[in-house]
Image: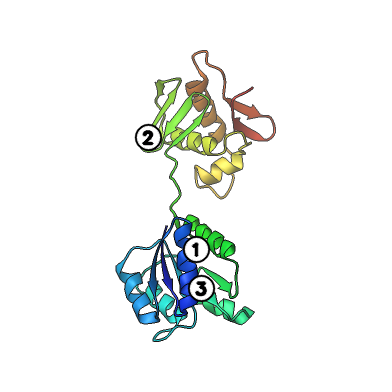
Amino acid sequence: MRVLLIEDDREAAHYLTKGLAESGHVVDHAPDGPRGLVLATSEPYDVLIVDRMLPGLDGLSVIEALRKNGNVVPALVLSAKGSVEDRVAGLRAGGDDYLTKPFAFAELLARLEALVRRGQPKAVETVLRVADLELDLLARTVTRAGRPIELKPREFRILEYLLRHAGKVVTRTMLLENVWDYSFDPQTNVVDVHMSRLRQKIDGGGVKPLLQTVRGAGYRLREEP
């Protein structure tokens, strides 16, 4: 990861820069608030280490300025001030974590890695599957053992919901709220009718059944062992 260290203490900066470099990371160092702010706004970084007490512009002001400009790079605040009020002030200023001096380098490194992981976008799941049943959210297609299955929009939504809750019992109320957007039971068999049609399409043709009716509870999509 690429780290920007904003720290005015030479010994502390040397210690952190050396340790991070030995851990395989790239480190840029700014010895005061103004230069740290310039670097943080002009270069891409994975994470910032910001000392709270800095010449020219204090660390919390640096972070506040970044946040006001839409910069959301994770920031770890370092400070000798460790009271609850100080930690709260650091977090409210836009800091993502707060570490009190003195600290162990191993803890600082672990906190940085956690901040970077937290800031990374999660992979978006585009294909849902159970056994040989697949639903492609992007292509809006469904296949069973490679065979295309034509579903109506409502059937597609039902199957998507069942796949997202594969192995779990899905009640009629859950389907009504999440597929039909009903906040009440219309007292009709609309769910049962659609589930019957869906079962014929995905479990027809002599394949191993995947869609189960759980008597008195609802439905479940899973592969039987």
Can you see residue 186? no
Amino acid at the residue labelled 2? Arg
Determine which of the numbered discs, if any, sits on residue 77 in the image: 3
Q: Residues within 10 Å of mark 2 (few under 14, many from 20)?
A: few
x 42%, y 86%: residue: 55
Q: Residue at x 62, y 39 (%)?
A: 171
Q: Secondary structure at mark 2?
A: loop
| Name of the residue lying farthest toward the bottom | 56
Q: CA distance from mark 3 to mark 1?
A: 18 Å
Residue depicted at x 48% and y 26%: 133
- Which residue corresponds to the image point at 43% horizontal and 52% vertical from the top-left? 121
Say what amino acid the circle numbered 1 marks: Gly
Kind of residue sitting beneath label 3: Val
Of the two numbered discs 2 and 3 on the same chain, state the one appearing first in sequence: 3
Q: Position of residue 25 (x, y in %)?
A: 43, 58
Residue 128 can be seen, yes or no? yes
**Residue 166 spot, x, y in % from top left:** 57, 34
Q: Which of 117/157 is in front?
A: 117
Q: Secondary structure at mark 3?
A: strand
Q: Position of residue 57 (x, y in %)?
A: 40, 84
Q: Quadrant of the N terminus?
A: bottom left
From this view, report whether residue 8 is shown above or below residue 199: below
* Residue located beneath label 2 in the image: 140
